[in-house]
Amino acid sequence: MKDNIKLGDPVFDKMLFVLDRPVTEENHRDYRFENEELLQISDGIWAMPAYMKENDEFSLFFIITQIDDGQTVLAFSTGEKAGEDFSLSNPIVTGKGLNLLMAHDQDRAASILHFINQISKAAEGNWRMVED
């Protein structure tokens, strides 16, 4: 594995952030980002805006859910508007979502990376490399 992987590096696309515990009704407020709060959008799936600006078609949302192996991961989804309907894309690996945002708004991507790294420093999650 490459050392010193940085935001914007193509290999960062393969970085996944895994939480040490599931998000629940009791602890979801522990993961507030700025003025945003996680909302449960389906059983076991939590979402929160990461990037939304008026007059900007691009939007990105934090998605926290369990994957097949039982781990709770922090991923991203893009917001997609079709007429009056709004939906979220399929989840995107954490690093790939941040790199996508990096191409759109570097400062916001760096801020979100700092937020995720604070979760890691609090010993509540870790970065992992995923296979293709």
Image (tube, rainbow, N blue to C red):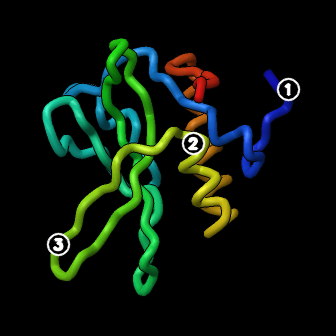
| Amino acid type, mark 2 | Phe
**Mark 1 — residue?**
3
**Mark 3 — residue?**
85
Q: Position of residue 3 (x, y in %)?
A: 85, 26
| Closer to us: 66 or 132 | 132
- What residue occupies the far front of the structure in this picture? 132
Of mark 3 and mark 2, the one earlier in the sequence is: 3
Relative to 24, say whether 76 is above or below: below
Q: Secondary structure at mark 1?
A: loop
Relative to 30, say whether 18 is above or below: above
Q: Is residue 50 visible?
A: yes
| Amino acid type, mark 3 | Asp
Residue that appears at 74% across and 46% down: 10
Q: Describe residue 92's horizontal placement relative to residue 106 as left or right.
A: left
Mark 1 to mark 2: distance in Å?
Answer: 21 Å
Q: Position of residue 122 (x, y in %)?
A: 57, 22
Residue that appears at 14% across and 32% down: 43
Quadrant position of the C terminus in the picture:
top right
Q: Position of residue 85 (x, y in %)?
A: 17, 72
Q: Is residue 121 visible?
A: no
Relative to 27, say whether 99 is above or below: below
The answer to whether marks 1 and 2 mark residues whose Cβ atoms lie closer than 8 Å is no
Of mark 1 and mark 3, the one earlier in the sequence is: 1
For label 2, the crowd category at 10 Å Cα-Cα, with few meaning under 14, some 14 to 19 and many 20 or more, is some
Quadrant position of the N terminus in the picture:
top right
